[in-house]
Image (cartoon, grey):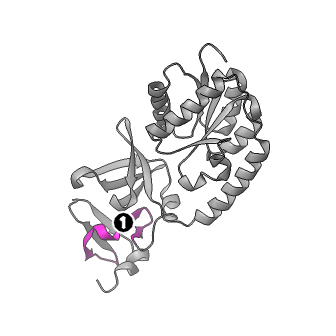
Amino acid sequence: MTARPTALIADDEPLLREALAGQLAEVWPELDVVAQARNGREAIELFEARRPDVCFLDVHMPGLSGIEAAHRIGGRAHLVFVTAYDHYAVEAFAQGVLDYLVKPVEPARLAETVARLKDRLNAAQPATNTALLLEQLAAELARLQHDTASAPLRWITAQVGSALRLIPVEDVDYLRSDTKYTRVAWRGDRGVASEALVRTPLKDLIARLDPAQFAQIHRSVVVNLRAIDHVTRGESETAEVHLKGRAEVLPVSRSYLHHFRGM
């Protein structure tokens, strides 16, 4: 073990990397986060350059995934996987050989993980050879991804100022495409109308939204049906959606007017 343990954090979301680094600084102040990677390929390159003792790897990253990066790192570091989906805490994780954290990372869970890592490092215990477990985990994750690809989205991660906000989908009033981003309008604390930009394209979010609750009303707009106050007809077979407690008026194009037939 080095004088000060070192770590790498890999996640394609900058705010999530910074949030985890901040949490680690509180629970493990002697740990040096020597590298932060935006994807699996960069994680491997930075690992080879810095050789950290511990790697915190997001399971899903563009390009090479956290699982694929872990294959390349092998038993040269202690691995902790980070996932947004609690059902990814499969048997390989639960065995205690492959450690994991669920987003948003809970302080108590992080403290448990850090305690285990400290024990392994203090005992000079080598990282486990996890090749077979990683193969099993990759197969299980692929199956779970397939099973849940159509599952309704539960929350949306958005940057609000300097903070990371987890927005429950049921609190969202509407989503609107905004160049490369998607504008999310929701009801914050005490029902206050709030907005934020997310990097996920609107078309990707639409695929995960519950069609019984959300309807696309324009090529760039999706609305929560529960947020609608009333709809007014316009010219040329168009309409406008007026929202409860919001001044914004959302356009309804001809292609989506069928949602409001008979209203």
Q: Residue at x 71, y 51 (%)?
A: 138
Q: Is disc 1 placed on a helix, strand or loop?
A: strand
Q: Quadrant of the C terminus?
A: bottom left
Q: Is residue 230 magenta?
A: yes
Instruction: Report x, y in % for residue 171.
Output: 33, 59
Query: Is 228 left or right of 29, judged from the image as shown?
Result: left
Q: Is residue 37 visible?
A: no
Q: Which residue is mark 1?
A: 223
Query: Is 243 left or right of 77, judged from the image as shown?
Result: left
Q: Amino acid at mark 1?
A: Val
Q: Residue at x 34, y 80 (%)?
A: 260
**Location of residue 173 by image quarter:** bottom left
Instruction: Report x, y in % for residue 231.
Output: 26, 74
Magenta-tinted stretch: 213-238
Q: Is residue 5 magenta?
A: no
As rendered, which of 63 and 25 lies closer to the eye?
25
Q: Is residue 167 above or below residue 223?
A: above
Q: How many numbered tags mark residues here?
A: 1
